[in-house]
Image (tube, coloured by chain):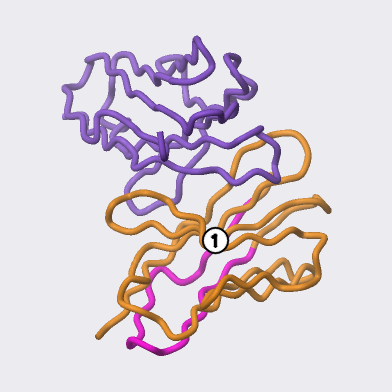
Amino acid sequence: AQTVTQSQPEMSVQEAETVTLSCTYDTSENNYYLFWYKQPPSRQMILVIRQEAYKQQNATENRFSVNFQKAAKSFSLKISDSQLGDTAMYFCAFIRGEGAQKLVFGQGTRLTINP
Amino acid sequence: GAGVSQTPSNKVTEKGKYVELRCDPISGHTALYWYRQSLGQGPEFLIYFQGTGAADDSGLPNDRFFAVRPEGSVSTLKIQRTERGDSAVYLCASSLMGGFTDTQYFGPGTRLTVL
């Protein structure tokens, strides 16, 4: 079974700083996708960024980038120039390439951006 | 609609009662997913529909939980004889075709409280 672990329950940084959220996962699959989702107090999960396991190049989306280390099964999210609106729960998630189409989520990291 | 919608937003019920939670996916999306998010945890998969059929219901915790999608669009999650442990946020998501490369778009969830 696949598992996703986020070891940082909470993080807090000042506005405009850079912050990195950690995620590790365990799988025997070779083909899969990894995601970071943001969940603000409104509860709606919003996709931040995604990475295909076969792509060596790290995904980037504006201020958000990932550090994907396939051998280490690590998938961290870096937020540059953090903004107050980035305050939310962040979930790392995994989906395998074959079989079940379900997302497997980590426990989440509560990120607070302070003014 | 523009996004995934879920009703009601909040539901309070008494132990032993029956509840129905509704999900209206993005128009044209053939795949629909239900997840359950307990307090302080990441979402956990319940069931996945491809069209009208349940392609994977391995996440349903017991036979008190049942879901339908009779016309391949709106889905209803039904919980019989509710227990206090059923209290959680129930999230619905949809994707275009259901493949693992498709992004799952989430609704705002229904917060169920069983007294």
Badge 1 density bin: few <14, some 14–19, many ≥20, Cα 10 Å: many
The picture places residue B89, in percent across and down from the top left corner, at 33, 39
Q: Amino acid at mark 1?
A: Trp
Q: Which one is nearer the viewer's eye here, B14 or A95?
A: A95
Vertical placement of residue A64 versus B70, above or below: below
Q: Which quadrant holds the N terminus of chain A?
A: top right
The picture places residue B80, in percent across and down from the top left corner, at 33, 14
Instruction: Give me the residue at 23% from left, 16% from top.
Output: B16
In this figure, which residue is indicated by the disc labeled 1?
A: A36
Report whether B8 appears left or right of A52: left
Q: Quadrant of residue B30?
A: top right
Q: Is residue A11 magenta?
A: yes
Instruction: Give me the residue at 45% from left, 16% from top.
Output: B66
Report whether A31 appears left or right of B2: right
Q: Which quadrant holds the C terminus of chain A?
A: bottom left
The picture places residue B7, in percent across and down from the top left corner, at 28, 29
Chain bearing tag 1 is A
Which color is chain B depicted in?
A: purple
Instruction: Give me the residue at 45% from left, 54% from top.
Output: A46
Q: Is residue B22 magenta?
A: no
Which color is chain A depicted in?
A: orange
Q: Which one is nearer the viewer's eye here, A12 or B70?
A: B70
Instruction: Give me the residue at 26% from left, 14% from top.
Output: B18
Q: Quadrant of residue A4?
A: bottom right
Q: Which one is nearer the viewer's eye here, B83 or B79?
A: B79
**Range shown magenta:** A3-24
Report whether B74 appears left or right of B97: left
Secondary-structure class at tag 1: strand
Report whether B31 appears left or right of B70: right
